[in-house]
Amino acid sequence: MTTRYRVEYALKTHRRDQLIEWIKGLLAVPFVLHSQPNISYPEHSEGLKTVAADTYQRYAEIMRDVEILINDHSKFISAYSGNTISDDRHNVLKAYLSPAVRHNNQNTPGKSKLKLLVPSVGTFFTQLHLEDAFQYQNDRRFISRRRFVAPSFNDIRLILNSAQLLGLVRSSDVQLVTFDGDVTLYDDGACLTPENPVIPRIIRLLEQGRKVGIVTAAGYEEAEKYYGRLYGLLDAVHESTSLTPDQKQGIIVMGGESNFLFRFDPTSDVRLTYVRRSEWLLAEMRAWREDDIRELLDLAESALRACAANFNLPAAVLRKDRAVGVYPVNGVRINRELLEETVLVVQNTVERSAIGSRLPFCAFNGGNDVFVDIGDKSWGVRACQQYFGGIDPSKTLHIGDQFLSAGANDFKARLASTTAWISSPTETVDLLDELELSLSHS
Ligand code: IMP
Ligand code: MG
């Protein structure tokens, strides 16, 4: 199984995205009640059209009702400064979050109706136009015409993405788009080569004066390493005659989740220049002490080594300045269960230690490796926002493939921006075209 199928495969595992599963459950009711398995083509095609139109109405009504519940949830949060990230390493984050976010994180009376129904639900930075998004995806996926296959996890994931794009375009703005690397821009472990169709789409964003950040876990201190992974895009930006020099400065690379920042540099052979931490760290990040970082990584490394020994993993441990990981040697694959077990063991070990409450970290399953990074993508995205002069979460979109809570590194970006959950580089390209379409209609 390649990691690009992680989203589909996740369906079969015990871990679930509660909001998606809940919406899926709501749509399953009209699906079951209205499905007509005994009517057959072609003699009843008129009857089937009527059934499909009826089913469409039912699904659309449900999406409208969910849209209203989400609106109420957002109003509830702003009215009562509700508890928005309680389920998410509350104490660790509390120590590091900005005053505004911390303010939202106080214990307050009661919960929104949506929070009662879907306890893991977080904050929404914009409205979600679910009914219109349903119509858009239904026109492509024929969800309401299907009689044997119910609305699926992927149907709803894509509807939520569309609803988010509409929310950004109609009730906000898109000033910054951040991209995960592996599985989002290119296949897992591959490179962004010159023929990748995402390149003209990213150039289009820059031409429109929007900012772009590549926020990847891949953590290197040398610009050459990122050039090696991203050269197709970086060369295209360099060679573009339609982009102004200022627009070319609109692309940055954040590596190691939130550890290494590079800006575009037309004078460099590798198109990138390392930006010193003193120039971009968020105020809270300046409090991260080097000896704490070392202590956290020592603890994570010992837990990783214990897992490698315990599960007899054919793996080596790689220790870096801001990360530690296990990766398989000799091209073997480690099974998903052991990768996830390793993530959870390390996460648990660090979280229960004193150092785990002083410093944010991110342990994740990289598809065929497990890495622990200092910080996480919420910090990475927020640092990009600050670097570009303080872009608001409601005007930022992070696109990634890893959103299933445990061991998924894009999940953390939800604390800092709106998000879209894709399952392959092709879906990223489709999403960027859908964004362009929405922008042209707005
Ligand atoms: P992403 O999908 O762009 O976030 O990349 C994640 C992958 O980068 C991981 O699965 C690792 O294979 C690789 N990687 C290389 N260096 C690091 C590191 O320092 N931290 C985390 N992941 C790393
Ligand atoms: Mg990825």
Image: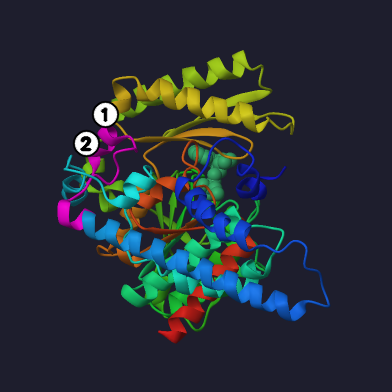
- Residue 85 to residue 272: above or below: above
Q: Foreground residue, 201 or 432?
A: 432
Q: Position of residue 357 (x, y in %)?
A: 28, 27
- Residue 27 to residue 364: above or below: below
Packing grade of label 2 (10 A; few <14, some 14-19, many >=20) is some
Separation of marks 2 and 1 at Cα, in angstroms: 7 Å
Secondary-structure class at tag 2: helix
| Residue bearing mark 2 | 95
| Residue 148, disc | none
Q: Which quadrant does the C terminus fall into?
A: bottom left
Q: Quadrant of residue 297?
A: top left
* Disc 2 + disc 1, Cβ < 8 Å: yes
| Residue bearing mark 1 | 358
Q: Position of residue 245 (x, y in %)?
A: 40, 77
Q: Is residue 83 magenta?
A: yes
**Residue 164 seen in render:** yes
Relative to 173, 141 lies left or right: right
Q: Foreground residue, 374 or 143?
A: 143
Indicate the amino acid at tag 1: Arg
- Residue 311 to residue 361: above or below: above
Q: Residue at x 55, y 25 (%)?
A: 342
Q: Which residues, given as a range, are shown in magenta?
A: 77-97
Q: Which quadrant does the N terminus fall into?
A: top right
Indicate the amino acid at tag 2: Ala
Q: Position of residue 253 (x, y in %)?
A: 44, 56
Packing grade of label 1 (10 A; few <14, some 14-19, many >=20) is many
Q: Residue at x 51, y 83 (%)?
A: 241
Q: Position of residue 176 (x, y in %)?
A: 38, 66
Q: Is residue 138 magenta?
A: no
Q: Foreground residue, 268 or 208?
A: 208
